[in-house]
Amino acid sequence: MKDWLPFEWIVGLRFLREGRMQTLFIVGGISVGVAVIVFMSALLAGMQANFIRRVLNTQAHIVLVPKPEATRALRRDGSEIEAAIIQQPTQRIRAIDQWQKIMETVGNMRDVVEISPMASGSALAVRGEVSRAINLAGIDTGKYYRIVKLPDNLVLGHARLGGTDIVIGKELASDLGLTVGDKLRIGTAAGGDAIQTVIGIFDVGNRGANQRNTYVTLRTAQSLLGMTGGVTSIDVTVKDIYAAEDIARRIGMLTGVEADSWIQNNAQFFAAVQAQTTANISIRFFVGLSVAFGIASVLVVSVVQRSKEIGILRATGTTRGQILRVFLLQGAILGLIGSGVGSAAGAFAISLWHSYARNADGTPMFLLVIEPALFIASAVLATITGLLAAVAPAVRASRLDPVVAIRG
């Protein structure tokens, strides 16, 4: 043993070496626990990232729209109600008042990353004798593509929109027999009518979106929908997607428009994400608890088995503090070694997942999120767990009466 090692290290390492079978078993148990924590954390984080990516693939984090028109009863002279039946206002496309000012105000908020105007409404796509109802979205490509990565979802053509160009979904192209370069007539209820050239076909992994969504330039949509210079919505992305609801409320109070967050629009999905997070925390807690009990039980047995040795050490002048630190050190060493082996096992399990978890077409099911912080946190957690688990055995060992311990 090296002379420069402190007394506690010399004794602690000797105890671990002499009880090597116990040491191997507890290190194995810790390793399995840490590997489970690492793999499950990466798996659940990967699932969440995959789900959120799919949900936010075709939508912004927050969408600003005009507030709904108020419904009022008919009155004859300002006080007497003339009609008891209250009807909703006539449905029509409404623009956001002073939308440029609102964009400037929201764009200056520190939580906002990107902002883009949109003019959208229902339209009819006609080719020959076949027609389909579509959602016509007019976009500023320079801004919108930083929010929704539409070019990344193209299967044919490109998305560099001009005044007479249109980008459509794969299902709509199939229904109308269209391909890149074909012409498509677009008509709207406002009387707009135009011939657009298909320059791109996209697939966002959602049949409904592929069948209805179409994209043209902002000016083209404004002209077709009869709202020159106006926009129907403003798309916003934020730094923290989980804070989108709070930011949306602040935007609504600041601007007076209605701000809908992706959390509000996908309430069931967000509840499922929260349930997954709770499950992940629960798994970590119970695995950590089982590891702690394993370490504590082994060290308690070690104290019982080495009672005479502890008594001799106490009789030869070893202080209670030194005995306490011997067993605390053993717990920390077991946790540290176990966390290292477990992290390596977890990383290996993650690599196996990436190699064998495949979709039917051979593409990866989804990538697990591997963060260095996860391994560091696991190592720290296992070491602290080992240290805390060793407290009770260490206190018991330090309180042994040397005479009683030697007599057995």
Image (cartoon, helix red, strand yellow):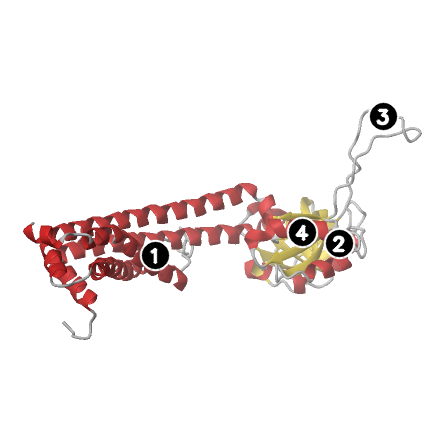
User: Which of 7 and 90 lies nearest the eye of the viewer?
Assistant: 7
Circle 1 SS class? helix
Residue neighbourhood size for the residue with mark 2, other residues' Cα within 10 Å, grouped as few (<14), some (14–19), many (≥20): many
Q: Nearer the viewer, mark 4 or mark 1?
A: 1
Q: Nearer the viewer, mark 4 or mark 3?
A: 4
Q: Earlier along the polypeptide chain: callout 1 or callout 2?
A: 2
User: Which of 154 and 321 lies nearest the eye of the viewer?
Assistant: 321
Circle 2 SS class? loop
Q: Earlier along the polypeptide chain: callout 4 or callout 2?
A: 2
Q: Position of residue 17 (x, y in %)?
A: 14, 62
Q: Position of residue 308 (x, y in %)?
A: 9, 55
Which residue is label 1 attached to?
A: 381
Can residue 349 be seen? no
Which residue is label 3 attached to?
A: 83
Which residue is label 2 attached to?
A: 231
Left or right: 328 in relation to 360: left
Q: Earlier along the polypeptide chain: callout 4 or callout 3?
A: 3
Residue type, label 4: Arg
Residue type, label 3: Ala
Q: Nearer the viewer, mark 1 or mark 2?
A: 1
Q: Position of residue 333 (x, y in %)?
A: 24, 61
Give the spatial CA distance, label 3 vs label 1.
Answer: 69 Å
Q: Residue furthest left?
A: 407
Q: Are marks 3 and 1 in contact (CB under 8 Å)?
A: no
Circle 3 SS class? loop
Which residue is label 4 attached to?
A: 250
Q: Earlier along the polypeptide chain: callout 3 or callout 2?
A: 3
Residue neighbourhood size for the residue with mark 3, other residues' Cα within 10 Å, grouped as few (<14), some (14–19), many (≥20): few
Left or right: 347 in relation to 168: left
